[in-house]
Image (cartoon, rainbow, N blue to C red):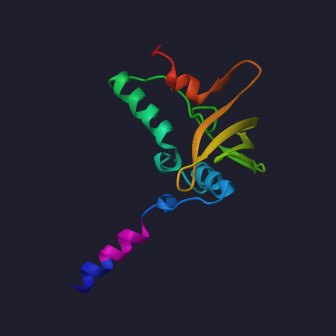
Amino acid sequence: MRLLIAICALLLLGQPAFAQAFSDTKALLEALYAGYMPPNDYPPDEKPLQSERLNGLFEKDQQEANGEIGRIDFGPYINGQDYQVSDLVIGEPYIAGGKAVVKVTFRNFDTPQELGFLLVNEDGWKIDDVWGGSPDYSYDLLDILQSPLP
């Protein structure tokens, strides 16, 4: 019986911290980018960090893509496919009406990135949209996910 209790305790301790509600916009974005920065080798499970609307659009995209690449062929939170994130700066939020806009800057490899995040308060802050890009290409995640399949 003690072994079973010990195993359950270890399993609970090993669960991601994303089950928590983020009362602070900065803590939410720090949790997102923690998975992209050393010593982590892979991005976090983003689903618990995203709004119901955004998760629904990702699920719809996956279903409609039918096993193929859907509307998104890059990591929208890093503006690329590969990543080596450094120099992360999370700006101060502008909060109004249960929503927040936050500017995030970082370097992905040697390329400076500047992204804007729309966060919504769904019993804690969640990512509802992100936009960014470069002079050659800009994107808005919601626009991409709501467009027809290519």
Q: Quadrant of the N terminus?
A: bottom left
Relative to 46, is 86 on the left or the right? Answer: right
| Quadrant of residue 2 within the rendered picture | bottom left
Residue 104 lies, with reference to residue 19, above or below; the image says: above
Q: Residue furthest front?
A: 97
Relative to 48, is 136 on the left or the right? Answer: right
Q: Residue furthest left?
A: 1
Q: Main secondary structure of the magenta part?
A: helix
Magenta-colored stretch includes residue 36: no
Q: Position of residue 79 (x, y in %)?
A: 64, 32
Q: Position of residue 113 (x, y in %)?
A: 74, 36
Q: Tag count in the figure?
A: 0
- 39 and 112: which is toward the camera: 112
Relative to 78, is 107 on the left or the right? Answer: right
| Quadrant of residue 115 within the rendered picture | top right
Residue at (62, 60) in percent of width and height: 23
Q: Position of residue 70 (x, y in %)?
A: 44, 23
Residue at (48, 50) in percent of width and height: 48
- 93 and 97: which is toward the camera: 97
Q: Position of residue 103 (x, y in %)?
A: 75, 42
Residue at (26, 82) in percent of width and height: 3
- 55 and 33: which is toward the camera: 55
Residue 21 lies, with reference to residue 104, above or below; the image says: below
- 100 and 29: which is toward the camera: 100
Q: Which residues are magenta?
A: 7-14
